Image: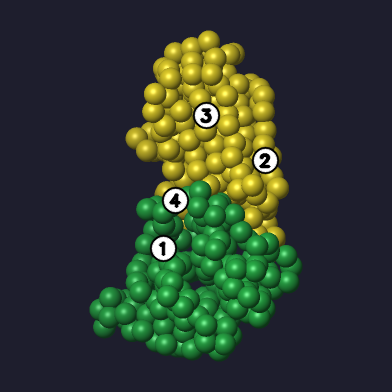
Chain colours: A green, B yellow
Amino acid sequence: MPTEHILSKITREATEKASLALSKLTHQQASLEFTKIELGKVTTVLKTLNPESVVTGIYLPISGDAKGASLLIFPEKVSYLLCDMLLNKKMGTTQKITEYEKSALNEVGNIILGTILTVLSNNIKVKMIENIPNYCQDMLGAVVDQIIVEFVQKTEDVLIIELVFHFFNTEVKGYVLIIFETEALKALIENM
Amino acid sequence: MKNIEVNMGDIAVVKGEDNLTASGIGSCLVITLYDAKQRIGSLAHSMLYAHRLSAEARDLKDERRKVNPESPDTKYADIAIDEMLKRVLALGAKKEDIVAKLIGGANMFSAFKSDIGKESVESSRIKLKKEGITIVGECVGGSQGRSIEFSVATGIVTIKTKF
């Protein structure tokens, strides 16, 4: 099966499952759509975006048969909206992220990244185990570069997934990056 | 005067009025070299230090890491420093007049057991000392991202953070 078809299939499946999970978590106030998925190179990832834009990054290490990293990135303002929904506050209340809000955001990361990894794992038949999520909020370039630096010695391939958060009448874009320690990802997808 | 953005793994060298910039630095290490008398400056946006390679990775990457005079792998700080020195000296800088600054090397996610940023900082200090280059300023470590603007006209390095 051509790589593009496999990636489209993964996108559709992940959208359905992640959207349902996020809706449940936020009491149906938010949903998610994965709009694009492609294989890219670590040194040029997200080059078109402003590296100084402030984002929230949720990093989820991956172990199992395919070791690597997954990173969910979304704009700072989405963090505050998600916290309001998850912590049952009036919209616009959250202005600061404390340990309490970090915990809620880590849970969102866990759900979104966990869903994608499960769909990926089922489709390419490789066992992937998610570990504990880690939060960071800073400039996009800084959030992404540590993940890249950790893995650039071992691989140059990264799976880049573009997603859209839907809140009421608002749509906000985010990204997921998935890197594995070896160049097996590309080979696995092409051999499906 | 123009701003020249130096991307991850690259270096740039300038003589004159331009600014060298590197935006959104986390664990990467930015190294600047400057000869104030000649107004020659260089900026490297390095990712790793050579010794960070495990033996296995070293074998796998040996072909890629071979210093190719046509395109040295400047994502490694040691190779970047060598290449920066070569290029600034070629432009007319005097080694005894060159000073260095180090910026970056943060640890953005505490989950990482290894602290690549810290290793890069320590190793670059050793490398620069070996080359006889004095480090005149550092803004390294911590857990904050940084953006850097290096004015070759004045030698001033301006650092921005999220706050």
Mark 1 and mark 2, same subunit?
no
Q: Amino acid at mark 2?
A: Val
Number of the label disc, if any, that sits on residue A122:
none
- Give the side of residue A15 with respect to residue B26, left or right: left
Query: At label 4, which amino acid type do we have?
Result: Asn
Q: Which residue is mark 1?
A: A157
- The front one of A13 and B86 is A13
Residue B43 coordinates in the image, percent (x, y):
50, 32
Mark 1 or mark 2, which is nearer to you? 2
Tell me what residue is drawn at x 39 percent, y 28 percent: B2
In the image, which is nearer the foreground, mark 3 or mark 4?
A: 4
Find residue B53 and report its horizontal and vertical position in percent. 57, 52
Provide the secondary structure element on which disc 1 rests.
Answer: strand
Q: Quadrant of residue A38?
A: bottom left
Dot 3 crowding, Cα within 10 Å, few <14, some 14–19, many 20+: many
In front: A5, or A165? A165
Judged by depth in the image, the label closer to the viewer, 1 or 4, is: 4
Can you identify the residue that label 2 sits on?
B140
User: Residue B46's x, y, as percent?
Assistant: 52, 42
Inter-mark Cα distance, 4 to 2: 23 Å
Q: Secondary structure at mark 4?
A: loop
Q: CA distance from mark 1 to mark 3?
A: 31 Å
